[in-house]
Amino acid sequence: MTNQAAKPFPWADQWPEIVDPRVRAAFAAVSRRAFIEEHLARFAEQDAPLPIGEGQTISQPFVVALMVQALHLQPGDKVLEIGAGSGFQTAILCELTATEGGVRGATIYGVERHAGLLARAADVLASLGYAPHLRVGDGAAGWTEAAPFDAIIASAVAPHVPRPLWEQLGEGGRMILPVGQHEDDQQLWLVRKLDGQMRVEKLGGVRFVPLISPLFDDPEQWAEE
């Protein structure tokens, strides 16, 4: 992880729930300011979502921290990110999975539906020394060629757990994603694959933009929950 020991964790006093020191160090290492537009710079350290264009948002930092803490990421973990968006969360994932002397982002695979957002995120990430694998695509379909994944994180709400993501999650893997049929009934799910079975822990209410995919029109593409 980048040596940023002298830099304070920007939301330290606000987040007693975030107890993992590696997660706190990752947030201290990554400047949110780099991932938002210039006219929003004064809001960079507010613990709130912000618009990034294309009707999408950069998530509330606390929610990102809660999600990545729940995944218990370790150096070298292979992670699939659904909804790379601005690239801010991608950078956090790069920090948490970095290995000593390795390329930061070598085991991160990010999918984003909007080509313009992904192009900007790729430029910012590269300028900061991160090198994740990124592509435009249907997030619910995942990234088959790179599977299996140790962890999957989705930054958009799905009505069901997409079967392709479940199938791409490795044995013992963790997936965190918001699930809900309506805007006001979203729950953050932590899904584990144990002996091939789905184990779900619900972590509380959230609000995310929808995960858009034709796969949700086909019940065969829903994982059993």
Image: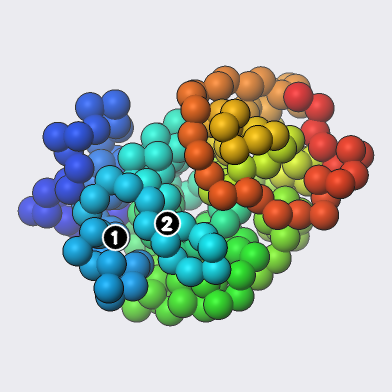
Which residue corresponds to the image point at 40% horizontal and 71% vertical from the top-left? 125
In the structure shown, which secondary structural element does the residue marked by tag 1 occupy? helix
Neighbourhood count class around disc 2 (C-alpha, 10 Å): few under 14, some 14–19, many 20 upward:
many
Residue 192 lies in quadrant: top right
Answer with left or right where residue 57 lies relative to residue 22. right
State the residue position of label 2.
58
Which residue corresponds to the image point at 62% horizontal and 61% vertical from the top-left? 111
Q: Is residue 165 visible?
A: yes
Which residue corresponds to the image point at 29% horizontal and 26% vertical from the top-left? 17
What's under tag 2, amino acid-wise?
Ile
Q: Residue furthest left?
A: 6
Neighbourhood count class around disc 1 (C-alpha, 10 Å): few under 14, some 14–19, many 20 upward:
many
Rendered-image quadrant of the N terminus: bottom left
State the residue position of label 1.
32
Rendered-image quadrant of the C terminus: top right
Return the residue nearer the eye: 44 or 144: 44
What's under tag 1, amino acid-wise?
Arg
Residue 166 in the image: state x and y as whole percent: 73, 38
Q: Are marks 1 and 2 in contact (CB under 8 Å)?
A: yes
Residue 216 lies in quadrant: top right
Q: How is the image coloured?
A: rainbow
Q: Is residue 135 visible?
A: no
Answer with left or right where residue 178 lies relative to residue 122. right
Answer with left or right where residue 203 lies relative to residue 181. left
Mark toward the viewer: 1 or 2: 2
Which residue corresponds to the image point at 8% horizontal and 53% vertical from the top-left? 6
